[in-house]
Image: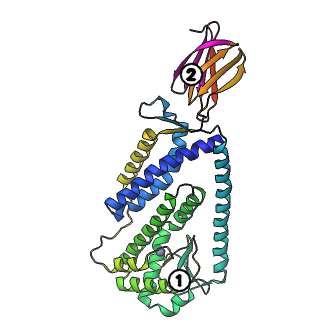
Amino acid sequence: MRFAGTWLLTYLVHSTVMLCGVALLSVVRRAERWEEFAWRTAMFGSVITAFIQMYWPPAHSAATASVPVNASGGLLPIVVAAWIVVAVVRLATLARAHRVLRRLVHDREPVAGLAGVPARVSVSRRIMSPMVISDREICLPAWALVELSADELEAVLAHETAHIARHDRAWLYATACVERVLFVQPLNALAASRLRDCAERACDDLALARCASPVALASALARAAEWIIGAPARPLVVGMATHGSLALERVRRILDPAVVRLDGRRRPLRALFAVAALTAVVLLAPVITSGPLVQYTISAHDEAGPFTLTLERGRVVGGTVDGAVARLRQSGDRVEVVPLKGEALRVTLTRDGGITWLSREKGGR
Ligand SMILES: [Zn+2]
């Protein structure tokens, strides 16, 4: 439980730094080309850096600071237990949304005669907007085959094909899982919303590169937006128009010839930038420990005999070996307990306020 608490607190620091950084950058300098990559790096990277910082103790580094958190009152274990319970419930509702979506398109039938679409195309009477339902299948609402012109239908399929090529469905599921489990970080909801908008804009641009007229894509989007009014919002839908997407803003953007279009190309420099940013967070973010602030004593024994260590705020303030007071040397998380006679004891302090036994050496110094 303490491990989970320490990780959660570390994650909250890392994710706040990174998500706030991206939010500020996007306000100061709105750049569609890097926005999606930056939000993904912040949202998923902070999960990873929190683990790295816990397993790569930077206590030896001068660039870090120790921020002990008072867990002695028993509040942290209760908070962590509540977090786990709520996260499981929220994940269960996500799984239910997935099952409801699969059941919704049970009535779908294949659509034949659509050339040049690198995916199966089906039609359902129970959905209101075109959507990607797997990595190989696009499902159209029945109205699309009746009301859309050939150019509009081509534009819709180009947009949905772009979602498949970009693996947007997998990204949406991953984003939804992080948002549901790590709800304690409210900025995750902002990141998820921005990522959804980024995906729609990118697919609009990729569709424009393939279809004849931007007017066809814009009018198809406007139609889809009309049809989903009043329909229930579904969290796991990758489609043409969703409740979270700004249809009007997208229509304006599609028709604006001055917009620099996203081309979906991978840029290795971005990966280097992401690695540098994540490394900086691991090195510079304060280390969180859930060890108690109050003084407490650990009693233990090894083959050489019993010993005690008294800790306070992540520091060893007293120790005994075989019942006799011992001298202490501490460097970061490494502690040497040197008795007046006998063997020196070496231990490592753990982030959860405990110790890991290292060795005893003959002839204490
Ligand atoms: Zn879309």
Provide the major secondary structure of the magenta segment.
Answer: strand
- Residue on which the image places disc 2: 335
Q: For the residue carrying disc 1, how many other residues have a C-alpha within 10 Å: few (<14), some (14-19), or many (20+)?
A: some
40 in relation to 80, above or below: below
Mark 2: which amino acid? Val
Residue 265 in the image, given as x and y percentages of width and height: 37, 63
- Tell me if residue 212 can be seen: no
Scheme of image coloration:
rainbow
Residue 55 in the image, given as x and y percentages of width and height: 55, 37
118 in relation to 75, above or below: below
Quarter of the C terminus within the rendering: top right
- Tell me if residue 52 can be seen: yes
Label 2, secondary structure: give it: strand
In space, the residues marked 1 and 2 are separated at their CA atoms by: 64 Å
Residue 246 in the image, given as x and y percentages of width and height: 43, 76
- Circle number at residue 17: none
Closest to the observer, 226 or 276: 226
What stretch of residues is rendered in magenta? 324-351
Left or right position of 100 against 235: right
Left or right position of 213 against 95: left
79 in relation to 316, above or below: below
Q: Residue at x 49, y 55 (%)?
A: 43
Left or right position of 269 against 142: left
- Residue on which the image places disc 1: 228
Pick whichever of labels 1 and 2 is earlier in the sequence: 1
Label 1, secondary structure: give it: helix
Quarter of the N terminus within the rendering: top right
Q: For the residue carrying disc 2, how many other residues have a C-alpha within 10 Å: few (<14), some (14-19), or many (20+)?
A: many
Q: Residue at x 54, y 27 (%)?
A: 333
Mark 1: which amino acid? Ile
